[in-house]
Image (cartoon, grey):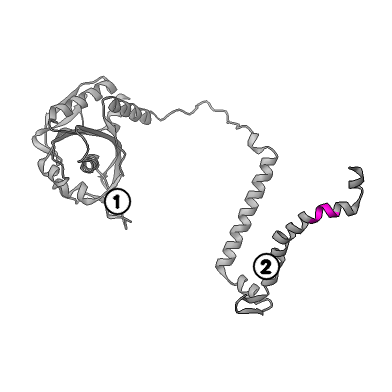
Amino acid sequence: MKDILGNRKMIALLLAPALTLYSAIILVPIFWSGAYTFFEGNVITGFKFTGLSNFSQFFHDPEALSATWFTVRYAVIVTVAQVALGYGMDRIGPLYPASRQPGSFNALEGFLDRTSTVMAGAGMDELMTFELADERSLYANFGRPSEQRIAVQDPKSRDHSILRDSLIPSLMAALSGNVKEDYPQRVFEIGRVYARDGGGVSEAWNLACLVAHAQSSYTEAKMYLSSVVRILTGAEVKTVASSHWALSAGRTAYVAVAGSRLGTVGEVTPAALEAFGLNVPVAGFEVDLTRLFKQLK
């Protein structure tokens, strides 16, 4: 081994294949590409020497300069990151400032999570729909006026152009898309709704639930509502005959807990069922969880 390492001819002979391959694959294309910068044309039409004109065009092309600047920044960031990792930056532990008020989970979020768990435990399927909806689902299908709608300026899609003021239309649309599935279907959603408030817009977290099958009724919807409120708050629900744009007259009531009106329960109108293409009765409720949570505090 010492004889080989001390023999320069032998070293050159051993390195020659690797250096030849490296030069053919790496070095030659680099120099070849550099030489091409002084010419224009191709192998078919031939090449014409242009001197520095290609460089002049490059430095006057905004897109080329932008791409070059992006490449330089990327290379710097990657290099710095690799060097930092090499010095063990990833092993530096976090240092938290001293505080007498440590963080905690948001109380409202915890209440919403508990509500979701209770509803799922009652055999409901949770849905998550868009806060932006279309005018037909929100208003036309229920025969209600849309003057108070909160519309998005220059929407990208008509299907997502209005901030919803209720969760019931979204759930109805979901049931409409599942008419070929087996019944009963029991769905709920916990989501934000929006309403005009003076010159501004207010928002609140609502819970809505719909039950769809041949025997669904006001009584069943109220049973689910009463159970959920009792589990969450320990309070009893009071219902008083009322009216609602989505629910049938005489089969509708507003919901009150501890004297505060929180929502509505009832059976969906036949006209709305027909508009959404549903052939089975649908009953349900919608309550303001934000207001209910404030009562607990």
Say which amino acid is labelled 2: Ser
The reply to whether the magenta stretch includes residue 136 is: no
Residue in the foreground of this view, choosing between 74 and 262 = 74
Vertical relation: 282 (above or below) 75: above
Q: SS class of the residue under badge 1?
A: helix
Q: In this view, does 8 lie to the left or right of 114?
A: right
Identify the magenta region.
12-16
Disc 2 marks which residue?
Answer: 33
Residue topped by disc 1: 160
Question: Which three-letter amino acid code belongs to the residue tagged 1?
Answer: His
> Can the viewer see residue 207?
no
The residue at the point 70 percent across, 59 percent down is: 26
Q: Which residue lies furthest to the top in this view?
A: 234
Between residue 257 and residue 220, name the one nearer to us. 220
* Real-space Cα separation, disc 2 to disc 1, in angstroms: 51 Å
Task: Identify whether 229 is placed above or below 201.
Answer: above
Main SS of the magenta segment? helix
Q: Can residue 152 be seen in this view?
A: yes
Q: Taking 202 as reference, is 265 left or right?
A: left
10 Å neighbourhood of mark 1: few (<14), some, or many (≥20)? some
Q: Residue 268 at x, y = what percent?
A: 14, 38
Q: Quadrant location of the N terminus?
A: top right
Density class for disc 2 (Cα within 10 Å; few <14, some 14-19, many ≥20) is: few
Q: In which quarter of the image is the C terminus?
A: top left
Q: Position of residue 89 (x, y in %)?
A: 66, 38
Residue 211, how many percent across, how many down? Answer: 19, 33
